[in-house]
Image (cartoon, rainbow, N blue to C red):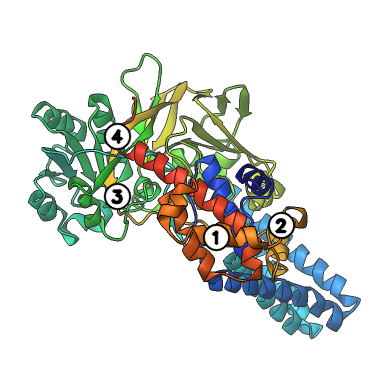
Amino acid sequence: MSEQCAVRETRRRPPATLYSFHVVVERVIDRAGRGGGGVAIDLDGRAHARQRWAARTALGAAAVAVLLPVAVARAASLLLLAGGLLGMGFTLAGIWWALTRRGPARAASVLLAVAAPVVVVALFAAANLLWVVVVSLMLWGLAVSAGKYALSSTKSHQVRVHEYRAPAPARPFLIMNPRSGGGKVERFALQEKAERLGARVHVLDTERPGGEEDVVALARDAVRDGADLLGVAGGDGTQALVAAVAAEHGIPFLVISAGTRNHFAMDLGLDRDDPAACLDALTDAGVEMRVDLGFVGTPGDGAPHPFVNNASFGAYAAIVQSPEYRDDKVRTSLEMLPELLTHQRGPRLVVRAGKTVIEAPQAVLVSSNPYRSDDLLGLGRRERLDSGRLGVLGVKVENAAEAAALLLGPNAPGVTVLTAQEVIVEADRPRIDVGIDGEALCLPAPVRCRIAPRALRVRVPAGRPGVPEPKPPLDWRRLRKLAAAVGRTALPKSRQNTGNWQDWQRGRKLRDPEEGRQEGQSSLSAQGWQVWRHVQGRQSRRNWETWRTYWATRTARVRQHRRKRDSPPDG
């Protein structure tokens, strides 16, 4: 079987399927063909065996959780299910009414949300079925946990952005906020370490009577004085302001994860637990990448406002704009939500993203590159930072049923997820509240959001930890395949090799790297012999062609990566 045939065959199969040792090889070949990063291979298969057993545990626990009420309660199991669903419905309705009402109506709604599950539990206890419900819920919890473990990876990955080598900066200038992140600048001795590495550090004076210092002016003055790198140890809002100055002058920007949430640092794969590790980028151990930079502004109203993460409109932006929000976040939110969710307060928004129009959403989030849409509650992860597209997330909820449907994620009827290069937000009022990377602003309507592709040079440590692999959604179909994958090969029988003498000779020639090169293989492909020796046997000999294709494809990717790494970008 030729390499071309092998690659075509592996690309037919879903790349996300990780249900056997050989499927891991397929996924590496497929991702290499697309230009994505590879995945680690466990040669002895122990890790994948644990995942298979976790999948079997998940399926078994789910089956017992379903059969137990039927076996114990028999016909009453239907009443058991109906009572549980009814109680859940009353609880969700009570929560929605509590958010959209005030005074006695809110108190009654809270009482309903609390009383509904209590009544359901009391009815189950009276029928001597409470233990069945508790055991079933525990089994469902076990099934979900084991299923997510079976489908997850414990590896870290880098956001797909092209990196390249660049000389270390000669005159870096860093701005540090001593109050950011609860005092991380002092706790991690960031100023002392940066100065030892040759950086000029300006610590913001947060107590001065005239208000906060202008970080944009500080950055511009530093560039005029010859700074060849700008950096910030602070929140994402401050990061965005200084990043725009760096992008304007074409010099690299350094992110130090000294903020509270550090969303931008997370997407860059930086160490958020040790901000001092970010300073390693000031040495020769740093690499550079080009990322997009977002801007929010009003046509003809001065310079636009930059953002590295997102700009929010609607309910959240109006709440953070309130002067009372910083003193009491929970109380302020509860006071303002009823009017905001029912359109009695705040502007009525109209969002235009390309050919799509979103009418009267309660909340809109425009991000520099789209967030992962499979988890609306876990926003903060972006698969790319250089796609040149804005991510748009609009939420429109009119009643309790639509609010409950938000649990379905991006498939909910009130959720709109799309991408665009430009987004226009209009309103029926002259000004709109906007939250830009957590900073509250009020801008004239309409507001235009745009993205500058690859406008920002970011310098990061080459050895940064990477982004934790997000937990995958629970896919029962994949779990069944994973649980039933014992002894199976990834290739169809019509494509399998027969383990003949020619296959043995093909592997034998790869003992010597020099012989491998003579046969048209690279030195990296010659390492395939070690893999073959480790997993030798009848099953491995039948699938040697898959391994050979993997190493050949990986060699091409390594060479391509080295060429890109050693050459600067075009623009």
Q: Say what amino acid the circle numbered 4 marks.
A: Arg
Left or right: where 218 falls relative to 72: left
Q: Give the class, few, some or many, for how many residues have Cα within 10 Å of label 1's Cα (few <14, many ≥20).
A: many
Q: Is residue 267 visible?
A: yes
The residue to which callout 3 is attached is 462
Do tag 1 and tag 4 residues touch (Cβ < 8 Å)? no
Looking at the rendered structure, the secondary structure element under dot 4 is strand
Q: CA distance from mark 2 to mark 1?
A: 16 Å
Residue bearing the label numbered 1: 507
Q: Residues within 10 Å of mark 4 (few under 14, many from 20)?
A: many
User: Is the C-beta separation of discs 3 and 4 under 8 Å?
Assistant: no
Nearer the N terminus, badge 4 or badge 2?
Answer: 4
411 is higher (above) or lower (below) than 472: above
How far apart are the alpha carbons under marks 3 and 1? Answer: 35 Å
Name which residue type carries label 1: Gly
The residue type indicated by label 2 comes to: Gln
Q: Position of residue 265 (x, y in %)?
A: 34, 48
